[in-house]
Image (cartoon, rainbow, N blue to C red):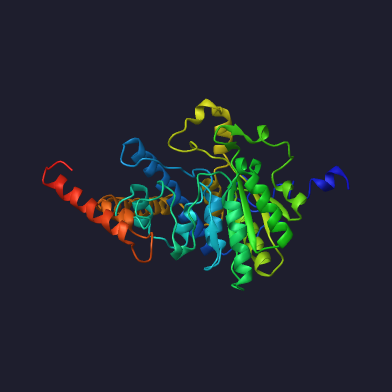
Amino acid sequence: MSLEDRDQDPDIALLRVLRDDGTADPATDPRLAVELLRRAYREMRRCRLLDARMLAMQRQGRIGFYGGARGQEAVAVAAGLAVGENDWVFPALREQAIMLVRGFPLRTFIAQIFGNSGDLLKGRQMPCHQSARSVCHVSWSSCVGSQAPHAVGAAWAMRARKTNAVAVGFVGDGATSQGDFHAAMNFAGVWRVPCVLVCQNNQFAISVPAERQTASRTIAVKARAYGLPGVRVDGNDFLAVYSVIRSALDRARAGDGPTFIEAVTYRMGPHSTSDDPSRYRSPDEEAAWAARDPVDRLRRHLGELGHVTDATDADLDGELSAELTASIEEAEAQPGLSTESLFDDVYAEMPWHLREQVAETKRHAAGRRRGQPS
Protein backbone atom coordinates (compact mmCIF):
# COMPACT_ATOMS: atom_id res chain seq x y z
CA MET A 1 0.00 0.00 0.00
CA SER A 2 1.41 3.38 -0.97
CA LEU A 3 1.55 6.38 1.34
CA GLU A 4 -1.11 8.04 -0.80
CA ASP A 5 -3.42 5.06 -0.34
CA ARG A 6 -2.86 5.04 3.40
CA ASP A 7 -3.80 8.71 3.55
CA GLN A 8 -7.24 7.76 2.25
CA ASP A 9 -7.83 5.35 5.14
CA PRO A 10 -10.73 6.60 7.27
CA ASP A 11 -8.65 6.55 10.46
CA ILE A 12 -6.03 8.86 8.93
CA ALA A 13 -7.84 10.98 6.37
CA LEU A 14 -10.22 13.63 7.69
CA LEU A 15 -13.81 13.13 6.52
CA ARG A 16 -15.50 16.43 5.68
CA VAL A 17 -18.76 17.42 4.01
CA LEU A 18 -18.95 21.19 4.44
CA ARG A 19 -16.56 23.43 2.58
CA ASP A 20 -15.50 26.74 4.09
CA ASP A 21 -18.02 28.65 1.96
CA GLY A 22 -20.93 26.59 3.29
CA THR A 23 -21.45 24.39 0.26
CA ALA A 24 -21.46 20.62 0.62
CA ASP A 25 -19.06 18.31 -1.16
CA PRO A 26 -21.32 16.14 -3.38
CA ALA A 27 -18.94 13.21 -2.94
CA THR A 28 -19.52 13.05 0.82
CA ASP A 29 -22.84 14.88 1.30
CA PRO A 30 -25.27 12.63 3.25
CA ARG A 31 -28.15 14.79 1.95
CA LEU A 32 -29.81 15.21 5.31
CA ALA A 33 -33.34 16.55 5.53
CA VAL A 34 -33.56 20.31 5.84
CA GLU A 35 -35.72 20.01 8.97
CA LEU A 36 -32.94 18.01 10.65
CA LEU A 37 -30.40 20.70 9.74
CA ARG A 38 -32.67 23.46 11.03
CA ARG A 39 -33.19 21.58 14.30
CA ALA A 40 -29.43 21.05 14.64
CA TYR A 41 -28.78 24.75 14.05
CA ARG A 42 -31.29 25.73 16.73
CA GLU A 43 -29.83 23.30 19.25
CA MET A 44 -26.27 24.47 18.56
CA ARG A 45 -27.29 28.11 18.99
CA ARG A 46 -29.06 27.26 22.24
CA CYS A 47 -26.00 25.44 23.57
CA ARG A 48 -23.79 28.41 22.67
CA LEU A 49 -26.10 30.85 24.45
CA LEU A 50 -26.44 28.57 27.48
CA ASP A 51 -22.67 28.43 27.85
CA ALA A 52 -22.35 32.19 27.68
CA ARG A 53 -25.00 32.68 30.39
CA MET A 54 -23.54 30.02 32.68
CA LEU A 55 -20.02 31.41 32.41
CA ALA A 56 -21.31 34.89 33.22
CA MET A 57 -23.25 33.58 36.21
CA GLN A 58 -20.18 31.79 37.54
CA ARG A 59 -18.20 35.02 37.33
CA GLN A 60 -21.04 36.73 39.24
CA GLY A 61 -20.80 34.11 42.01
CA ARG A 62 -24.28 32.72 41.36
CA ILE A 63 -23.02 29.23 40.49
CA GLY A 64 -19.80 27.51 41.51
CA PHE A 65 -18.53 25.74 38.38
CA TYR A 66 -19.27 25.26 34.71
CA GLY A 67 -17.53 23.52 31.81
CA GLY A 68 -18.46 25.07 28.49
CA ALA A 69 -18.64 23.44 25.07
CA ARG A 70 -18.09 26.49 22.84
CA GLY A 71 -16.61 25.30 19.56
CA GLN A 72 -17.62 21.67 20.14
CA GLU A 73 -21.40 21.91 19.74
CA ALA A 74 -21.56 19.96 16.47
CA VAL A 75 -20.49 16.65 18.01
CA ALA A 76 -22.89 16.72 20.95
CA VAL A 77 -25.87 17.91 18.93
CA ALA A 78 -25.19 15.38 16.17
CA ALA A 79 -25.02 12.58 18.72
CA GLY A 80 -28.21 13.73 20.43
CA LEU A 81 -30.08 13.72 17.13
CA ALA A 82 -28.61 10.41 15.95
CA VAL A 83 -29.11 8.15 18.98
CA GLY A 84 -32.18 6.01 19.41
CA GLU A 85 -34.70 6.44 22.22
CA ASN A 86 -33.27 3.53 24.25
CA ASP A 87 -29.57 4.13 23.56
CA TRP A 88 -27.55 5.10 26.63
CA VAL A 89 -25.01 7.92 26.57
CA PHE A 90 -21.91 7.99 28.78
CA PRO A 91 -20.65 11.57 28.34
CA ALA A 92 -17.41 13.33 29.12
CA LEU A 93 -17.26 17.04 30.01
CA ARG A 94 -18.68 18.67 26.85
CA GLU A 95 -21.66 16.57 25.82
CA GLN A 96 -24.31 18.28 27.95
CA ALA A 97 -26.30 19.29 24.87
CA ILE A 98 -27.14 15.63 24.18
CA MET A 99 -29.66 15.36 27.01
CA LEU A 100 -31.23 18.70 26.09
CA VAL A 101 -31.58 17.59 22.47
CA ARG A 102 -33.28 14.42 23.72
CA GLY A 103 -35.91 16.47 25.55
CA PHE A 104 -34.56 16.98 29.07
CA PRO A 105 -36.10 20.15 30.58
CA LEU A 106 -33.78 23.14 30.48
CA ARG A 107 -34.98 24.39 33.87
CA THR A 108 -34.11 21.07 35.54
CA PHE A 109 -30.76 21.01 33.76
CA ILE A 110 -29.91 24.42 35.21
CA ALA A 111 -31.24 23.54 38.68
CA GLN A 112 -28.56 20.83 38.87
CA ILE A 113 -25.90 23.52 38.50
CA PHE A 114 -27.44 25.36 41.47
CA GLY A 115 -27.83 22.10 43.40
CA ASN A 116 -31.16 23.13 44.91
CA SER A 117 -34.47 21.33 45.37
CA GLY A 118 -35.15 21.49 41.63
CA ASP A 119 -32.15 19.21 41.04
CA LEU A 120 -33.09 15.58 40.34
CA LEU A 121 -29.75 14.57 41.86
CA LYS A 122 -30.53 16.41 45.12
CA GLY A 123 -27.30 18.38 45.11
CA ARG A 124 -25.15 15.26 45.47
CA GLN A 125 -23.17 15.63 42.29
CA MET A 126 -20.77 18.36 41.19
CA PRO A 127 -22.26 21.21 39.14
CA CYS A 128 -22.50 20.47 35.42
CA HIS A 129 -22.52 16.68 36.05
CA GLN A 130 -26.14 16.14 35.00
CA SER A 131 -27.73 12.74 34.49
CA ALA A 132 -31.26 11.44 33.99
CA ARG A 133 -32.83 8.05 33.41
CA SER A 134 -35.60 9.71 31.39
CA VAL A 135 -33.16 10.46 28.57
CA CYS A 136 -30.75 7.53 29.18
CA HIS A 137 -27.93 9.88 30.16
CA VAL A 138 -25.29 8.87 32.73
CA SER A 139 -23.38 11.47 34.74
CA TRP A 140 -19.85 12.07 33.55
CA SER A 141 -17.02 11.56 35.97
CA SER A 142 -14.14 13.89 36.72
CA CYS A 143 -11.92 10.78 36.63
CA VAL A 144 -10.58 11.07 33.08
CA GLY A 145 -11.47 8.24 30.70
CA SER A 146 -13.79 6.30 32.99
CA GLN A 147 -16.77 6.72 30.67
CA ALA A 148 -15.26 4.33 28.11
CA PRO A 149 -15.28 1.10 30.18
CA HIS A 150 -18.67 2.05 31.61
CA ALA A 151 -20.09 2.33 28.09
CA VAL A 152 -18.53 -0.92 26.98
CA GLY A 153 -19.82 -2.75 30.04
CA ALA A 154 -23.32 -1.38 29.47
CA ALA A 155 -23.13 -2.47 25.84
CA TRP A 156 -22.30 -6.01 26.99
CA ALA A 157 -25.43 -5.98 29.17
CA MET A 158 -27.54 -4.57 26.33
CA ARG A 159 -26.54 -7.43 24.08
CA ALA A 160 -27.10 -10.02 26.83
CA ARG A 161 -30.61 -8.65 27.34
CA LYS A 162 -31.28 -8.48 23.60
CA THR A 163 -32.50 -4.87 23.88
CA ASN A 164 -31.18 -3.75 20.46
CA ALA A 165 -29.87 -0.63 22.23
CA VAL A 166 -26.40 0.84 21.76
CA ALA A 167 -24.10 2.45 24.32
CA VAL A 168 -22.29 5.62 23.26
CA GLY A 169 -19.22 6.59 25.27
CA PHE A 170 -17.27 9.85 25.02
CA VAL A 171 -13.69 10.68 25.94
CA GLY A 172 -11.38 13.60 25.29
CA ASP A 173 -7.99 13.36 23.62
CA GLY A 174 -6.28 13.27 27.02
CA ALA A 175 -8.28 10.19 28.03
CA THR A 176 -6.72 8.16 25.22
CA SER A 177 -3.50 8.15 27.26
CA GLN A 178 -5.30 6.55 30.22
CA GLY A 179 -5.47 2.86 31.05
CA ASP A 180 -9.28 2.92 31.14
CA PHE A 181 -9.35 3.81 27.45
CA HIS A 182 -7.14 0.90 26.45
CA ALA A 183 -9.07 -1.60 28.60
CA ALA A 184 -12.34 -0.44 27.06
CA MET A 185 -11.06 -0.60 23.49
CA ASN A 186 -9.63 -4.08 24.00
CA PHE A 187 -12.84 -5.41 25.58
CA ALA A 188 -14.98 -3.82 22.88
CA GLY A 189 -12.87 -5.30 20.11
CA VAL A 190 -12.66 -8.80 21.57
CA TRP A 191 -16.34 -9.12 22.46
CA ARG A 192 -17.74 -7.00 19.59
CA VAL A 193 -20.26 -5.27 21.82
CA PRO A 194 -22.86 -2.80 20.45
CA CYS A 195 -20.95 0.33 21.36
CA VAL A 196 -19.79 3.56 19.75
CA LEU A 197 -16.79 5.26 21.36
CA VAL A 198 -16.23 8.90 20.43
CA CYS A 199 -13.11 10.92 21.16
CA GLN A 200 -13.59 14.68 21.01
CA ASN A 201 -10.05 15.67 20.10
CA ASN A 202 -10.20 19.34 21.03
CA GLN A 203 -6.39 19.65 20.87
CA PHE A 204 -5.78 20.08 24.61
CA ALA A 205 -6.02 17.93 27.73
CA ILE A 206 -6.60 21.03 29.85
CA SER A 207 -3.26 22.67 28.95
CA VAL A 208 -1.34 19.73 27.42
CA PRO A 209 -1.43 19.66 23.59
CA ALA A 210 -2.25 16.36 21.91
CA GLU A 211 1.19 15.99 20.32
CA ARG A 212 2.81 15.93 23.77
CA GLN A 213 0.79 12.96 24.99
CA THR A 214 0.80 10.60 21.99
CA ALA A 215 3.17 9.80 19.13
CA SER A 216 0.33 8.23 17.15
CA ARG A 217 -0.23 9.79 13.73
CA THR A 218 -3.92 10.24 14.58
CA ILE A 219 -6.06 9.17 17.51
CA ALA A 220 -8.46 7.24 15.28
CA VAL A 221 -5.66 5.00 14.04
CA LYS A 222 -5.34 3.57 17.56
CA ALA A 223 -8.45 1.50 16.80
CA ARG A 224 -6.45 -0.75 14.46
CA ALA A 225 -4.56 -2.37 17.34
CA TYR A 226 -7.84 -3.47 18.94
CA GLY A 227 -9.57 -4.75 15.80
CA LEU A 228 -12.08 -1.90 15.65
CA PRO A 229 -12.85 0.30 12.67
CA GLY A 230 -11.61 3.83 13.33
CA VAL A 231 -13.02 6.94 11.66
CA ARG A 232 -11.51 10.42 11.73
CA VAL A 233 -14.06 13.14 11.09
CA ASP A 234 -14.12 16.94 11.08
CA GLY A 235 -15.77 17.59 14.43
CA ASN A 236 -16.77 21.12 13.40
CA ASP A 237 -18.83 19.82 10.46
CA PHE A 238 -22.31 18.81 11.65
CA LEU A 239 -23.20 16.97 8.45
CA ALA A 240 -20.06 14.83 8.57
CA VAL A 241 -20.32 14.08 12.29
CA TYR A 242 -24.00 13.15 12.13
CA SER A 243 -23.38 10.86 9.15
CA VAL A 244 -20.49 9.06 10.87
CA ILE A 245 -22.25 8.61 14.23
CA ARG A 246 -25.48 7.44 12.58
CA SER A 247 -23.55 4.91 10.49
CA ALA A 248 -21.71 3.63 13.58
CA LEU A 249 -24.99 3.28 15.50
CA ASP A 250 -26.57 1.35 12.62
CA ARG A 251 -23.53 -0.91 12.44
CA ALA A 252 -23.65 -1.67 16.17
CA ARG A 253 -27.40 -2.30 16.08
CA ALA A 254 -26.97 -4.73 13.20
CA GLY A 255 -24.60 -6.83 15.30
CA ASP A 256 -21.43 -5.79 13.49
CA GLY A 257 -19.65 -4.55 16.60
CA PRO A 258 -18.17 -1.31 17.91
CA THR A 259 -16.73 1.72 16.13
CA PHE A 260 -14.20 4.26 17.36
CA ILE A 261 -14.61 7.84 16.11
CA GLU A 262 -12.12 10.68 16.44
CA ALA A 263 -13.90 14.02 16.02
CA VAL A 264 -11.25 16.67 15.36
CA THR A 265 -12.44 19.90 16.93
CA TYR A 266 -11.27 22.77 19.15
CA ARG A 267 -12.25 24.07 22.56
CA MET A 268 -12.77 27.77 21.85
CA GLY A 269 -13.27 28.70 25.50
CA PRO A 270 -11.51 27.75 28.72
CA HIS A 271 -11.33 24.15 29.92
CA SER A 272 -13.68 25.19 32.72
CA THR A 273 -14.39 28.30 34.77
CA SER A 274 -11.16 27.50 36.67
CA ASP A 275 -8.95 27.80 33.58
CA ASP A 276 -7.12 30.58 31.71
CA PRO A 277 -6.29 29.31 28.18
CA SER A 278 -4.24 32.41 27.34
CA ARG A 279 -1.44 30.85 29.39
CA TYR A 280 -0.92 27.95 26.98
CA ARG A 281 -2.21 28.89 23.52
CA SER A 282 -1.81 31.83 21.19
CA PRO A 283 -4.34 34.35 19.84
CA ASP A 284 -3.35 33.35 16.29
CA GLU A 285 -4.24 29.72 16.96
CA GLU A 286 -7.56 30.68 18.48
CA ALA A 287 -8.36 32.93 15.51
CA ALA A 288 -7.54 30.17 13.02
CA TRP A 289 -9.94 27.76 14.72
CA ALA A 290 -12.60 30.45 15.18
CA ALA A 291 -12.73 30.64 11.37
CA ARG A 292 -13.91 27.00 11.46
CA ASP A 293 -16.61 27.65 14.08
CA PRO A 294 -19.17 24.80 13.75
CA VAL A 295 -22.18 27.07 14.33
CA ASP A 296 -21.04 29.51 11.66
CA ARG A 297 -20.33 26.71 9.19
CA LEU A 298 -23.79 25.21 9.53
CA ARG A 299 -25.28 28.69 9.32
CA ARG A 300 -23.46 29.32 6.02
CA HIS A 301 -24.75 26.00 4.69
CA LEU A 302 -28.35 26.78 5.62
CA GLY A 303 -27.87 30.22 4.14
CA GLU A 304 -26.72 28.64 0.87
CA LEU A 305 -29.89 26.56 0.91
CA GLY A 306 -32.00 29.66 1.53
CA HIS A 307 -33.26 28.64 4.98
CA VAL A 308 -31.48 31.18 7.21
CA THR A 309 -31.33 34.97 7.04
CA ASP A 310 -30.27 37.75 9.38
CA ALA A 311 -33.93 38.27 10.22
CA THR A 312 -34.54 34.61 11.10
CA ASP A 313 -31.36 34.61 13.21
CA ALA A 314 -32.58 37.63 15.15
CA ASP A 315 -35.94 35.93 15.79
CA LEU A 316 -34.20 32.72 16.88
CA ASP A 317 -31.87 34.54 19.25
CA GLY A 318 -34.80 36.35 20.83
CA GLU A 319 -36.72 33.11 21.28
CA LEU A 320 -33.74 31.25 22.76
CA SER A 321 -32.82 34.14 25.04
CA ALA A 322 -36.34 34.31 26.42
CA GLU A 323 -36.43 30.56 26.98
CA LEU A 324 -33.10 30.63 28.77
CA THR A 325 -33.96 33.64 30.93
CA ALA A 326 -37.21 32.04 32.07
CA SER A 327 -35.48 28.72 32.81
CA ILE A 328 -32.74 30.40 34.85
CA GLU A 329 -35.26 32.44 36.86
CA GLU A 330 -37.37 29.35 37.59
CA ALA A 331 -34.35 27.21 38.52
CA GLU A 332 -32.70 29.86 40.70
CA ALA A 333 -35.95 30.49 42.58
CA GLN A 334 -36.18 26.89 43.79
CA PRO A 335 -35.61 26.54 47.55
CA GLY A 336 -32.56 24.81 48.93
CA LEU A 337 -32.52 21.16 49.89
CA SER A 338 -33.39 20.10 53.41
CA THR A 339 -30.60 18.66 55.53
CA GLU A 340 -32.66 15.49 56.04
CA SER A 341 -32.41 14.73 52.30
CA LEU A 342 -28.86 13.57 53.03
CA PHE A 343 -30.39 10.34 54.36
CA ASP A 344 -32.64 9.62 51.39
CA ASP A 345 -32.01 7.00 48.72
CA VAL A 346 -29.49 4.97 50.71
CA TYR A 347 -31.67 2.04 51.76
CA ALA A 348 -35.05 0.83 50.52
CA GLU A 349 -36.12 0.83 54.17
CA MET A 350 -34.25 3.21 56.46
CA PRO A 351 -32.48 1.33 59.32
CA TRP A 352 -32.83 2.37 62.95
CA HIS A 353 -29.48 4.12 63.25
CA LEU A 354 -30.25 6.42 60.31
CA ARG A 355 -33.70 7.16 61.69
CA GLU A 356 -32.00 8.29 64.92
CA GLN A 357 -29.63 10.51 62.96
CA VAL A 358 -32.51 12.06 61.04
CA ALA A 359 -34.30 12.87 64.30
CA GLU A 360 -31.12 14.38 65.75
CA THR A 361 -30.60 16.47 62.61
CA LYS A 362 -34.13 17.82 62.87
CA ARG A 363 -33.61 18.74 66.54
CA HIS A 364 -30.43 20.66 65.67
CA ALA A 365 -32.20 22.46 62.82
CA ALA A 366 -35.12 23.41 65.08
CA GLY A 367 -32.69 24.71 67.70
CA ARG A 368 -30.89 26.91 65.19
CA ARG A 369 -34.20 28.39 64.02
CA ARG A 370 -35.01 29.33 67.63
CA GLY A 371 -31.55 30.81 68.06
CA GLN A 372 -30.49 28.15 70.58
CA PRO A 373 -27.04 26.53 70.48
CA SER A 374 -27.06 23.12 68.81
Q: Residue at x 57, y 40 (%)?
A: 266
Quarter holding the C terminus?
top left
Residue 164 vertical placement versus 296 (above, below): below
Location of residue 164 by image quarter: bottom right
- In the orientation shown, which residue stands out farthest toward the bottom? 162
Q: How many numbered marks does the figure carry?
A: 0
Location of residue 3 by image quarter: top right
Q: Residue at x 69, y 69 (%)?
A: 255
Location of residue 159 by image quarter: bottom right
Residue 169 is situated, as x and y percent measured from the top left of the image, at: 58, 55
**Drawn side of residue 129 relative to residue 91, left or right:** left
Q: Residue at x 61, y 63 (%)?
A: 155
Residue 316 vertical placement versus 273 (above, below): below
In front here: 179 or 374? Answer: 374
In front here: 68 or 363? Answer: 363
In this orientation, does residue 240 appear?
no
Residue 298 is situated, as x and y percent measured from the top left of the image, at: 54, 51
Residue 371 is situated, as x and y percent measured from the top left of the image, at: 11, 42
